[in-house]
Amino acid sequence: MRKRARLIYNPTSGRETLKRQLPDILNEYEKAGYDTSAFCTTPEPLSAQKEADRCIKDGFDLIVAAGGDGTINEVINGMSPHLYRPKLAIIPSGTTNDYARALKIPRYDFVKAAQLIHKNQTVHMDIGRVKTKTEDMFFMNIGAAGFLTEVTYDVPPNMKSLFGSLAYFVKGAELLPRVGKVPVKITYDDGVYEGVASLIFVALTNSVGGFEKIAPDKMLGDGKFTLIIVKTTNFAEILRLITMLMNDGRHTQHPKVLYKKTSYVKAETQNNQQLMINIDGEYGGDAPAEFTMYKQHLEIVTDLDRMQLSINTRDLMTEEKEEEFKKRVMELQDKEEE
């Protein structure tokens, strides 16, 4: 009996190119031995999540998530609560595609991404779960709080469509002068941090917002979050930390950065000030927030050979975007010195 695959795709992702290439994408999974069908997401809330949940209940062998990080997050939320979880393949067609970048899945050739199924290579990925005042959800890449998380809310949709993740870099530079003090209490496996924080990251991969050195020593599937707390709200210090992050990843050793591996995080504010939690690029409720680890929870189709080869290589497009961000940061530094 042939195996069954379901492609769940976002029709608004990939500037219509994804829809045009659907026959070729589906054909790759058919050649790999799957009876393959497709589901087009709708404007209904959690459309992709509900379809992934239905597919598991119907016993599908493979789910293919085609879209941006938001679509992939929904599919993962549909899959993660189940005891039986089929393989997951990803066709990245969004703006930043952080998750695909971390897994070295081709991000600019949808058919090539589908062809990974023929290599028969997978990786078992950790999944996080976060509970806030109003939400209880799974996430695959990043939980965050602080001033830079505002970027995802402030970038207009038309700017994202035109400039992709560059829009986030530029907007991030513009937001730097607005850094405010948020007194927090962050509990993790080995201790507690109490003090001000301008940024808090709870990361499952090394790729966040287009930056690939947020967690330079991250090992995928190790059962640990990378907890990063930027313990300063000083504008000049934050500029220096961002420069270190982009140049060589030395931010992890900076005295104003708490950098820990942990399987649990609880983030609270100490003065009832609102602290919005960003989950995989979308608003996920307000603190207090508890993050728990689901080790190697999902089996995801990838290219293990490319993952090994690319450990010390960089994406040219990412480098161009980082250079643009550096330029904006330098402009802000010059203004700060005047």
Image (spheres, grey):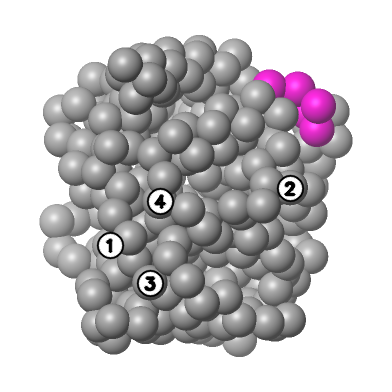
Residue range of the region highlighted in magenta in the rendering: 310-314
The image quadrant that residue 42 belongs to is bottom left
Mark 1 vs mark 3: in front = 3
Are discs 1 and 3 less than 8 Å apart at CB? no
Q: Amino acid at mark 3?
A: Pro
Whether residue 246 appears in this view of the structure is yes
Which residue does the numbered mark 4 point to in the structure image? 233
Tell me the quadrant of the picture where the C terminus can be found.
top left
Are discs 4 and 3 less than 8 Å apart at CB? no
- Coordinates of residue 63 in the picture (x, y in percent): 52, 59
- Against 231, residue 111 (above or below) is above
Whether residue 6 appears in this view of the structure is no
Secondary structure state at the residue bearing disc 2 = helix
Say left or right for 110 vs 9. right
Say left or right for 203 vs 67. right
In front here: 122 or 96? 96
Task: State which tag comes first along the sequence, 1 or 4.
Answer: 4
* Magenta residue check for 313: yes
Which residue does the numbered mark 2 point to in the structure image? 253
Which residue does the numbered mark 3 point to in the structure image? 183
